[in-house]
Image: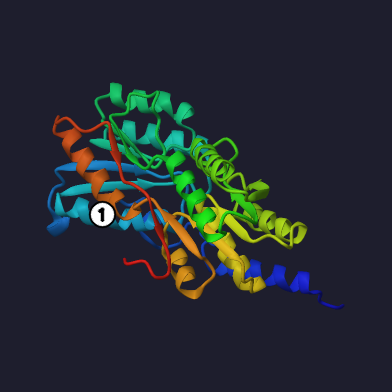
Amino acid sequence: MSVTPKKCLLFIVIFSLFTTVGCRDANTSGPLLSSETPSSPKNDQHPAHTFGIIYPMAHSFYEVITQLAEKAAAANSVQLLVKAPEEISLEQQIRMMETMIKQKVDGIAIDPIDPDALTPAINKAMESGIPVICFETDAPNSRRLSYIGPDHYRGGALMGEVVGKLMKGKGMVLVESGSSGSTIQKDRLSGMLDYLSRNTGIQVLEVGYNEGSSDRALSDMERMIDDHPHFDTLVTLDILSSSASILLWKAKGLKRNSLAFGMMPNVKEALINGQITSVISQNEQVWGDHIIGQLLRAARGEGIPVYVDTGLREVTKDSPE
C-alpha cells in the first residue's frame, strides 16, 4: 500500500500530539494535575488560608500560572487547591465550584468557561462568605469581587494592528478561533475584524472554530490551508489553536506568517524556531501574584479593585523578556 504525502502528514501530526500537550491522563505529573493533592506551605506550617483555583481545562498554559501562584502562596502560608477539567467541561467546572464551597475554602479564583452559567455558583460561594475573583474571563453579572486580566476586544484590535503592519495593509488571512460561544473569542475576533476593516485592505478568507478541541483545531487549519493555498497569514486566537498551529507548521514546513494569542512554553520555543512570527501576550506571568494577592486581601476583609488590567503586548523573537 502506497503512503501519500497527506497520510504522512497526518501520521506526523498525530504522533506529535501524543508526545506533547495532547497526551494527558490521571498519571500525568505537573502542577495542574498533581494539585488534586493540595500544595503545602513552607516548613510544614499550618496554612493561614486555603484558596482554590479553577481553570477551564488542563493545559500547559495554565500550569505556568499555577507554578507562579504556588510561589506566592508558599511565601504567604497559603494552601492551594487547583482543579481543571481534562477538557473544556462546564458541568465539571460547576461541580468543582460546588466542592470548594462544601470544603469551605477561604477564597476562590475561577476562569469561567461560561460566565452566565457559572454565575449562580459564584453567587452561592459569595453568599457562603467565600470571596470569589475571576481571571482571564470575567463574570460581570455575578457578585464576584474582582476581575484580573486584559480587555479582550482591545487584544483583538492589537492583533489586527500587528497583522496590518506585518502585511503592509494588504493580503489574505486565515483565522482559527476557540469556542463560537465564548465571550473572549467573540471579543477578540470582533476587535481584530473591526481594526482590519477600518484600517486595512486585508481580506479575511475564513474563520474556523475548534469548539474546545485540539484535534478539530488541527483539522480545521489543515483544511483551510488546502482550500486557500495562497493565504499570507494564519491568526490563531486561542491556546488550543496556537499549539496546534505549531505542529502544523513543523509538519508542513510552511514559510508563511503565523500569529498567536497567549504566551506559553511551546509558543516561546516556536518563536525562536520560526514557526510563529508574533504573539499577543496578556502578561500572564503576573496573574499568579495577582490571584494570591487579591484573595489574601479579600480573605482579610480588605477592599480590592473591581478590575485589575494586566495589559497586552506583542512579543516577537527579538522582544526582550
At x 71%, y 60%, the residue is 225
Q: In this view, does 112 lie to the left or right of 255?
A: left
Location of residue 138 by image quarter? top left
At x 22%, y 39%, the residue is 294
The one nearer the camera, 32 or 112, is: 112
Task: Kindly identify the amino acid type of the residue bearing the numbered disc 1.
Answer: Glu
Q: In this view, does 18 lie to the left or right of 157?
A: right
Q: Residues within 10 Å of mark 1 (few under 14, many from 20)?
A: many
Q: Give the x, y percent position of residue 124.
A: 35, 23
- Asked if 259 appears above or below 6 in the picture, the reply is above
| Residue that mark 1 sits on | 70
Q: Give the x, y percent position of residue 65.
A: 34, 54
| SS class, disc 1 | helix
Location of residue 254 by image quarter? bottom right
Q: Give the x, y percent position of residue 188.
A: 50, 42
Q: In which quarter of the image is the N terminus?
A: bottom right
- Asked if 248 appears above or below 139 in the picture, the reply is below
- Asked if 10 appears above or below 241 in the picture, the reply is below
The one nearer the camera, 255 or 239, is: 255
At x 49%, y 75%, the residue is 273
Q: In this view, does 32 lie to the left or right of 4?
A: left
The one nearer the camera, 167 or 102, is: 167
Q: In which quarter of the image is the C terminus?
A: bottom left
Q: Give the x, y percent position of residue 93.
A: 45, 38
Q: Can residue 260 be seen in this view?
A: yes
Q: Is residue 86 visible?
A: no
